[in-house]
Amino acid sequence: MAERKQTDVGSLRVGGFVLLDNIACKIIDVQTSKTGKHGHTKCRIEAVGIINSEKKIFVKPSSDKIDIPIVEKKSAQVLSVHGDVANVMDSETYETFDIKVPEELKGKVKEDTNVIYWIIMDEKVIMQVK
């Protein structure tokens, strides 16, 4: 079971995370409409996929429940780089594993550098070079 928790749509904020179609996304815009004569407050959320940068927009009543991914932030040391895959060792557990190097960090991820990686929905993603 993937790491997630639930919250109300109305409590989502810009910069937070949300699960849309089982894809972890970062919220870039939140708009809230006023209640209508018979309706509820609705929220229009604009988000971008953390892993694939896919843009998503959805509108839901603010009282609806929605899943939020639990993001673990960890650091690791790069042991070797082969093409677009880096072999890294976790700084705390000393576990070694292969992780894909994102397009925008190619050239910056080198042997003996430290990186910050996130674990989102059982997927590991390099987010920055220390």
Image (cartoon, rainbow, N blue to C red):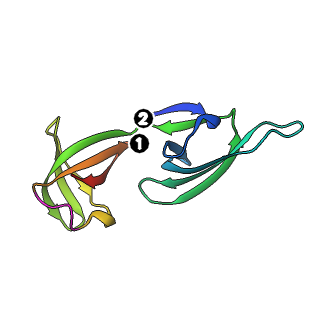
Q: Is residue 118 above or below residue 52?
A: above
Residue at x-position 57% and y-position 31% = 7
- In this orientation, which residue lies closer to the viewer: 78 or 122? 78
Is 127 colored magenta in this rendering? no
Where residue 73 sits, quadrant-wise, is top left
Q: How far across and down, in percent of the image, does residue 2 sit?
A: 43, 37
Q: How far across and down, in percent of the image, does residue 54 sit?
A: 51, 60
Residue at x-position 39% and y-position 39% = 71
Q: How far across and down, in percent of the image, does residue 80 sit?
A: 12, 58
Residue at x-position 46% and y-position 60% = 53
Residue at x-position 69% and y-position 48% = 59
Amino acid type of disc 1? Met
Mark 1 sits on what residue? 121
Is residue 52 rendered to the left or right of residue 42? left
Mark 2 sits on what residue? 3
Q: Secondary structure at mark 1?
A: loop
Amino acid type of disc 2? Glu
Q: How far across and down, in percent of the image, does residue 97 sit?
A: 20, 48
Is residue 8 rendered to the left or right of residue 38? left
Q: Secondary structure at mark 2?
A: loop
In the image, the segment drawn in magenta is: 107-111
Q: Residues within 10 Å of mark 1 (few under 14, many from 20)?
A: some
Q: Earlier in the sequence, mark 1 or mark 2?
A: 2
Where residue 101 sits, quadrant-wise, is bottom left
